[in-house]
Image: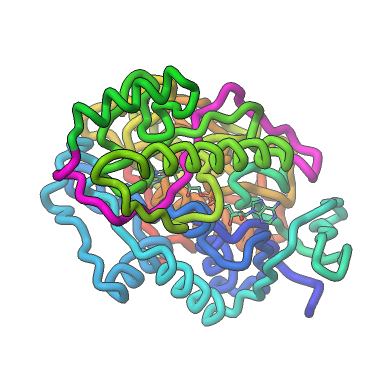
Amino acid sequence: MEHHFDIIVIGGGTAGVVAAIQAARAGGKTLLVEKNAIPGGTMTAAGIAFPGLFYAWKKQVIAGIGWELVSEAAAESGMPLPEFEKQNGMENHPAYQVRLNPLVYALCCEEKMSAAGVHILYHAMPAEITPFAGGAAVKLCTREGLAEFYAKRIIDCTGDASAVALAGFEVEHPFPCQPGTFNCRLSGYDPDALDWEALSAAADKAVAAGELCYTDLSWNNRTLTAQFIRSYGDNSNHIFPESSPHSAAGRSALEQSAHRSLLRAYRFLKRQPGMEHLRMELAAFECGVRESAVIKGEYTITGEDYVSGRKFPDALCNAFYPIDLHGEEGVEPLKLNEGSVPQVPLRALIPQKSDFLLAAGRCISSDRTANSALRVQATCMATAQAAAAAAVVSCQLNVPLSQTPAEKVREMLKQHGAILPDGI
Ligand SMILES: Cc1cc2nc3c(=O)[nH]c(=O)nc-3n(C[C@H](O)[C@H](O)[C@H](O)COP(=O)(O)OP(=O)(O)OC[C@H]3O[C@@H](n4cnc5c(N)ncnc54)[C@H](O)[C@@H]3O)c2cc1C
């Protein structure tokens, strides 16, 4: 395998796939490094395959490579697109997320990356990142041991800002943080044939006996809701981290909590009348993490910036989703100001004092309020395309990231089908 690249993208998830394709299509020799064996990250490994939101106020605000991947994978697997023309702001926003088949999506992502010329290295993680003039050496932990790779620019798409932290730049790990969710797929029962009153009483008893937590079956911790059972397990529990899930230890503890939660749910449900034939199958092999880390960027997007749709001179892409902070009581999505479309500036993708490394996806520089909305998939894809365009432009002009002219990055984004923010 070759070891010298223009761009190394670390993390081949929601954002990483898009970043790698953009970098390669723009002529950068690109390596994608992914710890799992399949691309897509949260969308595939955690089974959360309903990207939102590409439209705002009935108008498309995010397109480009993310939209290309999503719309083509939806068509390929016969999943209809939402009726975007009916989308009225934030009303019933989940209905305007695109339902995907996660496996088909992953396979299409890999095909597109290969077609763009991206070199893909699965089963690898960075162990060390050492800057040198004009780039950095990245020591990867591979199956054969440590191996050194070199790049002019690095894009951290790990979701956890792991590469940014390894390179020595500041990263914040909010804790307590939002709960995760561990997806599964249930079958073998009819929710409409269940005695819900009896089920609720049985759940109260099981919780009192310490055999069940309400959040094993829903997003709220006060009572049994129909959420988990009616959705057949899909995106319906809350797994609260015991420590920040950015580290190996924190993530291991979270995964084990998720496994215990699912086993409690399974044992409880299987003994309820009408659920004797319950089957539980694998829908995800990782617990989905909503919040773990954000970089400390040249600019930090605030909740106020987000809700008001603040305009930035170095804006590269749009974002759109309600404020969506999950907690003990579930989630109460908070609407944006009427007509506003939040923007993401280049400075929120660049760690302070970084010349060669930037980040995309859910770990971009933002406060907790803004991040709870910026973390959604369409926005992660838009930030990834923007970060990759910025990386390539800064290489081409041979300038540090912080001196990369936003208008040149926007030119490249436009050439590659992205929608640019209004008013710049
Ligand atoms: C339960 C849940 C529900 C959600 N619901 C929605 C929703 O309805 N709609 C929506 O749009 N969004 C939703 N989101 C948000 C969204 O899915 C994520 O925030 C987004 O997918 C994160 O994208 P990312 O690229 O930053 O990270 P990820 O998609 O997680 O990708 C990170 C990738 O990096 C890899 N990686 C990590 N560390 C390393 C390393 N050190 N070396 C190599 N590879 C590494 C991982 O394996 C992974 O492939 C939800 C999230 C969760 C958890």
Q: Residue at x 86, y 51 (%)?
A: 130
Q: How many marks?
A: 0
Looking at the picture, does residue 302 appear above or below residue 385?
above
Residue 135, quarter of picture: bottom right
Which quarter of the figure is the N terminus placed in?
bottom right
The rendered magenta stretch, by its main secondary structure, is classed as: loop
Q: Position of residue 334 (x, y in %)?
A: 30, 25
Which quarter of the figure is the C terminus placed in?
top left
Looking at the picture, does residue 352 appear above or below residue 412?
above
Residue 266, quarter of picture: top left
As drawn, the residue found furthest toward the left would be 86
Pick the residue in front: 172 or 24: 172
Viewer can see residue 408: no
Pick the residue in front: 332 or 162: 332
Magenta includes 169? yes
Q: Residue at x 37, y 30 (%)?
A: 219
Magenta includes 271? no
Q: Position of residue 221 (x, y in %)?
A: 39, 22
Q: How is the rendered protein coloured?
A: rainbow
Viewer can see residue 272: yes
Pick the residue in front: 236 or 93: 236
Q: Is residue 333 left or right of residue 87?
A: right
Q: Residue at x 65, y 48 (%)?
A: 358
- Residue stretch in magenta: 165-194
Looking at the picture, does residue 39 appear above or below residue 48?
below
Q: Position of residue 256 (x, y in %)?
A: 62, 40
